[in-house]
Image: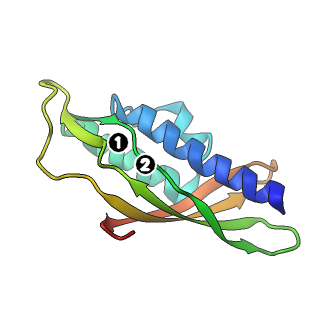
Amino acid sequence: MDKAKQDALASYRGMWQDFVAAGTTSDWQSPKLGRYATGIALTNMSRALYADHYNGLVTKGEPTYEPSVSSVEPPDNPNKIVITDCSDDSRWLKYKADTGQLANDTPGGRHLINAIVQKQADGSWKVSEYGVHEAGTC
């Protein structure tokens, strides 16, 4: 079970690393997005990056993470792991791609994130869903 938790946490971190990297150019078609994400999670990331691309925005900097496993199902041979995180995006902000200026004056903050990581048919773990709550939720 510890290996499953480690693999799920590694996939969760990998998903966000790929999302942060794609955000520097708002590359909504980045093939890396599917390495650790699938289903709704992948769709939501692609849509967010497309919206930024369409609006001429890029994201610079890097958020922080504090993920932990909050549940494992089934306990004896897990195929679904729920992760709870508190991510700080105050150093990961949106900028206008053409001018490099901050896109808005909204400061970042600490966001509660809940994610479902599921074991895939090939044995890998991928984030299938996630929810990012408002700043100040953790």
Is 16 positioned to the left or the right of 106 in the image? right
**Does 113 appear above or below 36?**
below
Q: Could you say whether the residue bearing mark 2 is in a helix, strand or loop?
A: helix
Q: For residue 21, say whether it is visible.
A: yes
Q: How crowded is mark 2: few (under 14 residues within 10 Å), some or many (20 or more)?
A: many
Which image quarter is the C terminus in? bottom left
User: Which residue is at the front of the view, 127 or 93?
Assistant: 93
User: Which residue is at the front of the view, 70 or 21?
Assistant: 70
Q: How far is mark 1 from mark 2, CA to CA?
A: 6 Å
Reading the image, the residue beneath label 2 is 45
Contact (CB < 8 A) between labels 1 and 2? yes
User: Which residue is at the front of the view, 71 or 41?
Assistant: 71
Three-letter amino acid code at disc 1? Leu
Q: Position of residue 62 (x, y in %)?
A: 39, 39
Q: Position of residue 84 (x, y in %)?
A: 55, 66
Q: Which residue is drawn at 79% across and 53% down?
A: 121
Residue placed furthest toward the right: 76
Q: Residues within 10 Å of mark 1 (few under 14, many from 20)?
A: many
Q: Which mark is residue 61?
A: none
Q: Residue 49 carries which label?
A: 1
